[in-house]
Every structure is written in C-alpha cells, then in structure tokens.
Amino acid sequence: MRPVSLPILLDREARIPVFEQIAIALREKIKSGDLAAGALLPPTRTFAADVGASRSTVVNAYDQLVAEGYIEGRQGAGFVVCDIGALSLPARQAVEVATSVKPRVMRAFRPGEPDMRLFPHRSWGKAVARLCRRAPEEMLGSMPRFGHEGLRAAIAQHVADWRGLSVDPAQIIVTAGASDALELCLRSLCVVGDAVALEDPGFRPLTQFVRSQHLMPVYLSSDGQGAGLPTAAKVAVLTPSQQFPLGGSMSPQRRAGFVQWAQSGDRWIIEDDYDSEFRYAGRPIPAMAGIDGLSRTIYIGSFSKIFANGLRLGYAIVPMALLDQVAATQRRFGARASLMPQAPLAEFMRTGEFYRHLRRVRRIYGQRRVVLTEALRSDFADVGRFVDHQAGMQIAFHLNKELQDLDIAQRARAQGLEIEALSQYCLGLARYNGLLLGFCGFDETELAEGLKQLRLVLNASIQ
C-alpha cells in the first residue's frame, strides 16, 4: 500500500501550534471521508519535509490522533486511518468543533502546567461511556469510605510499579488533589501550637494553611543534600524526590536522617511526591516512604500534573496505625474528592491507557525540556545559570545579582508571559533570585516565542 498524499498548508503566524494545525487538518480529512479507513499516512520524516516542519512536530500530531482513536500505528506498516464509522455533523456540532480549536492564550512559562491538548480525550470518553452502560452507580452512587475501591487498588499497583512501595489498598485515601491530602494529614496529626517543618524555599499556600490552623511553621533551609533536619517539630513536610521549587533530589544520607528523626520520637514525615513520574534520565528516585516502610511517613501523590488538572484527584497513603485517626478527621470535615471521575480513572489505569498516556507525555515533555535547557545554555548564559536535574516540569533559572527577579517577572507578564520569581517562594531566611520556567505545557514553537520575548525583557532590564 502506498502512502496517501497530504497537501496541508500551515499558518506560521497563527497562535495555534504547528502540531495542532496538522492534527486538526488530518482529523477533518478523516471525518469528511477524504482519508478513508485503512489509508496509509506518509512516514513522519517524509511528511515533515513535505509540510516544512520538524519530525518531532509531526510525531506529536500523529500521537495526538492515535490517542483520539483516529489513526493507529501498525508494526512494519506505519500509521493507518482507523474506521471511525459514520459521523453525523449537524450545524450545532460544527460550531462546537470550530470553537474547540480557538487558539489559547500563550502563557509560557507557567510552572507545573501540563499540556491538556495532549490528553487522550477520545479514549477517556470511551472509558466513561463503558462505565455509564455497565455500572453507572459507580460514578453517581454514595462515596465509599476513603474513595472508589477500584481506584485505590489501581493506585496501590501504580506505586508498587513506579515507586517501589508495597501497600494495602486499605491504606489509600482518595483526595481532591495533593493540597487536600496535605490539609487532611496536618489536621489529623497536629493540634494548636504544634511546630510543622517546611522546606524553604517551598510551597507558599502550605505555609498559609499552617498559619491559619494556628500551627507554628519552622523553615528548613536547603544545602547540597536537601532540606536540613529540624531541631524541634511534630511534622516535616518534604519533597525529597524533586524539591519544589529548586529541583533536585534529597541525598540518601539526608533521607535516612529524616527517617531516624521521625522514628526516634512522636514525629511524622509527609512526603509530597507531586511529579516524580517525570524523570527523563536514569531510574526513578526511591520514595522516602519505602525507606521508612510506611511506619512514620505519609505518602502523598496527585493526578493533577501527571494526567489531568481538571480531575482534582490525589491520594494519601497512610500508615495503618493512623487510619482511624485520619478517618475521624475526614468524617469531621467531609470528603472533598468527587466520586464521578474515580471509576473512569480506575478503568483507565486497569486497561493500560493511563500508562500509554504517561509514557507519551513524558517523552514529549522530555523533548521540550531539551529545547528550554539548550536555549538557556546558549542564549542566556550571560544573565544567569541553572542546574539541569533531568526531572520535573520546570527549571529554576538563577539570575545574576544585578537583575531582580520580581522586576523581570513583572516586565515579562506585561509581554504576555507567565513567569514566577523564585524569591516569591522564599518563606523564612532563604534568599533566591531567579525565575521559575515551566516547559511542559508549551510546544517547541511556543517555547521559542516565549524565550524570544524573555530575552527582550532581560535586554531591556540590563540597559
């Protein structure tokens, strides 16, 4: 079978990314029947040369259509068009399609921003439809204790495969994201006046919650091994696999030190493992909860960054000795996680669709990280420096002392960029001057445009 010819005109001035323009054009050709079921698409290199785009851009477009179910890859044959059946496209639906491809506002470099354009909407819709037919009560019934049982079992398998944690699903509590899990744990462990150790720099909303509960924050400055050990605290909240916002993992010696600190008294560690799935080289960093054997450590994870930020789902894995205490807190304040998305997510994980998506976005995010880091090395070395930890969703770029990060961030926002100053994350004595640059939510074209604008902002500040 010969590949079909695909004449596609790209608009280089449009705000719609090139890969999305290609995906839109192919999707419409498949829907209209111009590309029949079984048609063989051109190889990615050939197609890239024909349309004047990079091969990675075409790969991203093909990957998007595979995720949506319009094309499929066949071993030794390339990509072929799927049989999507007869489609009726009334005028109302045509308007919705046109609305769905409106260009989004470019907001590089917002940190921690997943690219929801890569979300497998079609596969997710099929999972939801299957459950609606088979067991709709799983999405609309009463909330089981600690969350949907199937999802808790899937999470237990996930942390076993990806984080080396052997846990009982009974230890898992489904929450409305990581922040909800953190609040639930702190309410369960602390009483008014208790000291809570927090990393500095760190997650400012957590400090605000600690203060609102009349707890005493104790700030832990970071050195080459990670956060320093607290002298006096009831709980330590840590990001040992990928420190936020600086990046980098805690050393094995420091991890062991924290575990010993917790086990030697009535103390607890809350491990916030917010994006450890996004490592682009080497093996995943072992979870601190594994070293501790989930004895004095509560492990917190989230689906907001690794899967979909709109689901608002996370989880806490609690030591057995704490379950009743945490359950009492949840009854007192109420469960916040919605039941509706839990069963579809469990189905998505069970069938492997979740992991296919995770591997795909990790590869794409890795490519985007390379674009950003190479540009910072070649075009921004005169204004700052960074450490490439080959992990995470953002880069901490430390500015030279003659530049002020708050001023740069304000100027950048005026140019349509969304850049956060590192100094805003300093909670106690820590002093950092830099920019937090997210790269996951933006394709190569958007990153290049954002870097161009950032360079102009920096040039204006230097003069």
Image (cartoon, grey):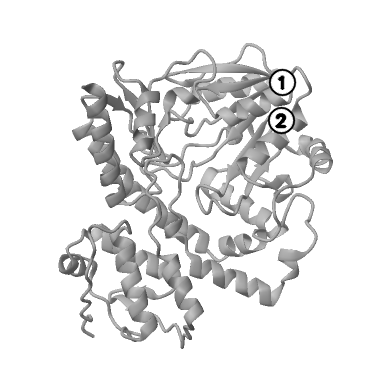
Say which quarter of the image contains residue 124: bottom right
Residue 6 location (% of width, % of height): 22, 77
Q: Furthest-front residue in view?
A: 414
Closest to the observer, 17 or 235: 17
**Element on which disc 1 rests:** loop
Residue 431 location (% of width, % of height): 44, 16
Q: Quadrant of the N terminus?
A: bottom left
- Residue beneath the point at 57% across and 32% down: 288
* CB-based contact (under 8 Å), mark 1 and mark 2: yes
| Residue corresponding to mark 2 | 186
Say which quarter of the image contains residue 257: top right
Q: Relative to residue 304, is residue 459 depicted above or below?
A: above
User: In this view of the protein, can residue 228 be seen by the observer?
Assistant: no
| Residue corresponding to mark 1 | 215
- Residue 299 is left or right of residue 33, and the answer is right
Say which quarter of the image contains residue 223: top left
Residue 129 location (% of width, % of height): 61, 74
The crowding category of the residue bearing disc 2, from other C-alpha atoms within 10 Å (few below 14, some 14 to 19, many at least 20), is many
